[in-house]
Image: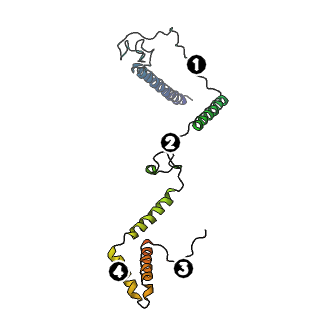
Amino acid sequence: MASLNPSQGSGQGTGTAPSRQAENLHADRRNAFADAPLAARPVGYGLPCAKCKTYYASNLTACPVCKSPQRVSANAPLATVSPAETLPDPEQLEEERERFLREFNAQVIASPLPAESPTPALYCNRQENHANSAAPATICQECFDHLQERVDVLQAAMHMDAKEASQVIYDAVWADPSDPNKTYLNAAQAILNELKRRSGVAQVFGPLQPPPN
């Protein structure tokens, strides 16, 4: 029995050692936090400058912009804000819009365009042919261009050279010398056929009928 006491005493001694080590560790941590310097707290913005209304840090003694040391007083009354402009009634806006359109259309109808500035779509653009006043257009521009081309071709056909015309007559006269009574008729027919060919007029086979009265 006596031999078991030393072993029991040694067991209790080893059980208290970890608790002392833990207390020493906690003490060392407390001392480390106590010796460490505290981090600086962030500085916020204070009241704005009384002169230029610039916001600057609360730890500064003067405004960094205008160097004024005075800030806006916290007890100063707030500036009154004017109420927002009220929007008009949509129905009223629609009525005013309709009224404006009616008045504008009435003015347009009451004041037609002057004669010296006619509308190109309604009046002839050949103003040199209408010196007194503008004349209404009776043909579109595309049809006018087409007719102008045909007139140009006909005018070019009429400018036949005299030598060419005499050659046409000579060939027509001597093509059929059997009947002397048809000499002038053959020459005239040859000239007309040449003019038609040059002007692009379609050939008519057969006698032409006079238009009915």
Report the side of 64 relative to 88 (left or right).
left
Q: Residue 124: x, y in percent?
A: 49, 51
Image quadrant holding the N terminus, namely: top right
Q: What sort of colour scheme is used for the picture?
A: rainbow
Extreme left residue here? Answer: 163
Q: Are marks 2 and 3 in contact (CB under 8 Å)?
A: no
Return the disc, 1 or 4, that comes first in the chain's sequence: 1
Marks 1 and 2, how far apart at CA: 54 Å
Describe the element under mark 3 as helix, strand or loop: loop
Sooner in the amino-acid sequence: mark 3 or mark 4: 4
The reply, left or right, for residue 150 in relation to residue 206 is left
Residue 186's quadrant in the figure? Answer: bottom left
Disc 1: which residue: 83
Name the kind of residue labelled 3 in the image.
Pro
Work out whether 106 lies above or below 72.
below
The tag on residue 115 is: 2
Q: Tag on residue 23?
A: none
The residue type indicated by label 1 comes to Pro
Q: Secondary structure at mark 2?
A: loop
Instruction: State the residue at coordinates (38%, 80%).
Output: 169
Q: Earlier in the sequence, mark 2 or mark 3?
A: 2
Q: CA distance from mark 1 to mark 4?
A: 101 Å
Helix, strand or loop at label 4? It is helix
Q: Residues within 10 Å of mark 3 (few under 14, many from 20)?
A: few
Query: What residue is pinned by disc 4?
Result: 167
**On the picture, is 88 further left or further right than 203?**
right
Residue 170 percent location from the top left of the image: 36, 83
Determine which residue is flagged by label 3.
207
Count neighbours of disc 1 (C-alpha within 10 A) and say few if under 14, some if 14 to 19, many if 20 or more.
few
Task: Kindly identify the amino acid type of the residue bearing the numbered disc 2.
Answer: Ala
Q: Position of residue 192 (x, y in %)?
A: 44, 76
